[in-house]
Image: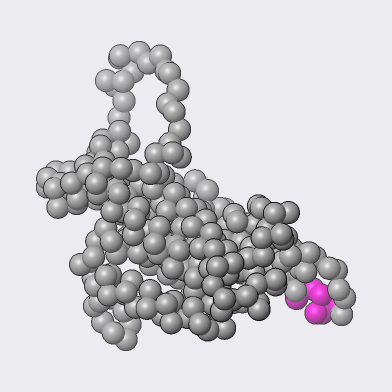
Amino acid sequence: MNRSVVSDLWYKMVHSGSRMNFFIGINTIIFLFFAVVNVVEFLFRMETGILPFLKVNLALPAFLPSLLYKFWTLFTYMFVHEDFLHFIFNMLALYWFGRIFEDFLNARQFTFTYIAGGIVGGLLFILFYNVFPGYQETLPYATVVGASACVMAIIVATATLLPDYNLHLLIFGSVQLKYLALVYILIDIIGMAGLNAGGAIAHLGGALLGFVYIKQLKAGNDWSKTFQRKPRLKVVHREKVTSRVINDIPEQEVIDRILDKISQKGYQSLTKQEKELLFKASNKNEE
């Protein structure tokens, strides 16, 4: 692969400021590692034991005695995909909805929604399998992997923030986000009695987090501020501040104030100038 292509992809993942790109990149790297090891084992007719070891130690178990010794899997499971279709559909959905999310909210809020959605999805999976009799037979060996709970959190959060936003689909045409999210949720409710019951339950947990988080955000409670870094004290000379050139791109402090206003009063409360500033900032992130 051309070195410039690799450099460009690395920049988009790490330095672009987009958390959507970052999480897609992390999931892709881990998926490709699993895929390469699998191909090598197949070609050389060898069993390294790497994949079984990783699956056992990265997948989230529902059985509490197993979870006690693998507590880290509540975090690691959300970055592991075994099946190609599972991986590609998750990443496509994360891209489609993540772009909209990042147009209206900031990187910290995206990170919180993704991680918290995965954690709540995992906890709901554990809860259901240990509470409901229908899952007791499979409880000792039930596990879940994949970013679906995280993706569902982003989908439902975006639809809750912008329910009437239209997304253009290849076959169905223009569809409002609230209806797309509702279809996803109904499919997962039905799936709770299917072959991938654990995954469906985790999806619903992520959806719940996404919905509640945005409702709280609109009420003025931004849970993502738990991820906020405390600013370091700086000594700045006045003349350097006044002479700084920003090339018509709004400063981050201005953008943060606009995002806070969206959180408290909604996007419709922005003035025309504020919308233009937000648009310029989003275009800068895409370059």
Where is 187 relative to 152, above or below?
below
User: What is the magenta segment's predominant secondary structure?
Assistant: helix
Q: Which of 213 and 257 is in front in this view?
A: 213
The location of residue 229, given as percent across then percent down, is: 45, 33
Magenta span = 39-44
Is 164 situated left or right of 244 in this image?
left
> How far across and down, in percent of the image, does residue 90 sit?
49, 70
Q: In this view, does 107 lie above or below 59?
A: above
Q: Residue furthest bottom?
A: 171
Residue for point 42% across, 18% down:
234
The answer to if 10 sits in the magenta stretch is no
**Magenta highlight on residue 43:** yes
Q: Give left or right: position of 18 versus 144.
A: left
Q: How many numbered marks appear?
A: 0
Residue shown at 39%/62% (left/top)? 208
User: Which residue is nearer to you in this view: 52 or 39?
Assistant: 52
